[in-house]
Image (cartoon, rainbow, N blue to C red):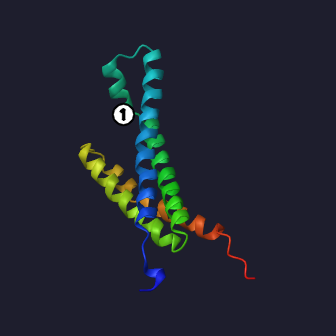
Amino acid sequence: MNNKRKINIKAIFIGWLVDTVGTVIAGFIIGIIAAVFLAAKDFGADQIAEELSNSAAVQKAAIFIEFTLTFIGGYVAALIAKEDEIKHAVLVGVLSLVSSLIITAAMQQQDPMMYLVSLFILPFAVLGGYLKKTTKKEDKVK
């Protein structure tokens, strides 16, 4: 079997973990910060939950973070794989897309735009792999 056909499962899994766990942690932090900010404005617990779920700013921040971490996950997979960078980044993107769609469905998201936004996950992962590939230092020929 040709080395170029091998898939580094570890690289893909770590890239996906960076994306998924990072997105969850960042989302949690954003939620806490927003909740503290709203509580300081004398919002009650029910009002805070309502405000967070309907806030366009929170949704935009979450999307930005999700795409950024998907980009980083694709980059990390490409970095660990050391070859076929884009292929590994694509596989991270596919896993992240599937994860995102499952989470979105589990949250019973009614806004179809959130499903459409999820489709941009794959290109961001590929961009991460592409960045790694294009910035890779080639081995010097002696």
Front-lying residue, 12 or 112: 12
**Figure check: 3 above or below 34:** below
Front-lying residue, 55 or 107: 107
**Figure check: 83 above or below 111:** below
Q: Residues within 10 Å of mark 1 (few under 14, many from 20)?
A: few
The answer to whether any part of residue 127 appears in the image is no
Measuring from the top left, give residue 123's x and y in whole percent: 47, 63
The answer to whether any part of residue 40 appears in the image is yes
Number of labels in the image equals 1
Front-lying residue, 76 or 53: 76
Q: Quadrant of the C terminus?
A: bottom right
Quarter where residue 46 is shown: top left
Front-lying residue, 110 or 75: 75
The residue sitting at 59% across, 70% down in the picture is: 133
The residue sitting at 48% across, 81% down in the picture is: 4
Q: Quadrant of the N terminus?
A: bottom left
The residue sitting at 34% across, 21% down in the picture is: 47
Q: Which residue is label 1 attached to?
A: 54
- Considering every residue shown, the one lying at the far bottom of the view is 1
In the figure, is residue 70 to the left or right of 79? left
The residue sitting at 45% across, 45% down in the picture is: 22
Measuring from the top left, give residue 29's x and y in whole percent: 46, 33
Measuring from the top left, give residue 70's x and y in whole percent: 47, 55
Quarter where residue 109 is shown: top left
Per the image, label 1 sits on a secondary structure element best described as helix
**Figure check: 37 above or below 104:** above
Kindly identify the amino acid type of the residue bearing the numbered disc 1. Answer: Asn
- Considering every residue shown, the one lying at the far top of the view is 42
Measuring from the top left, give residue 127's x and y in whole percent: 53, 63
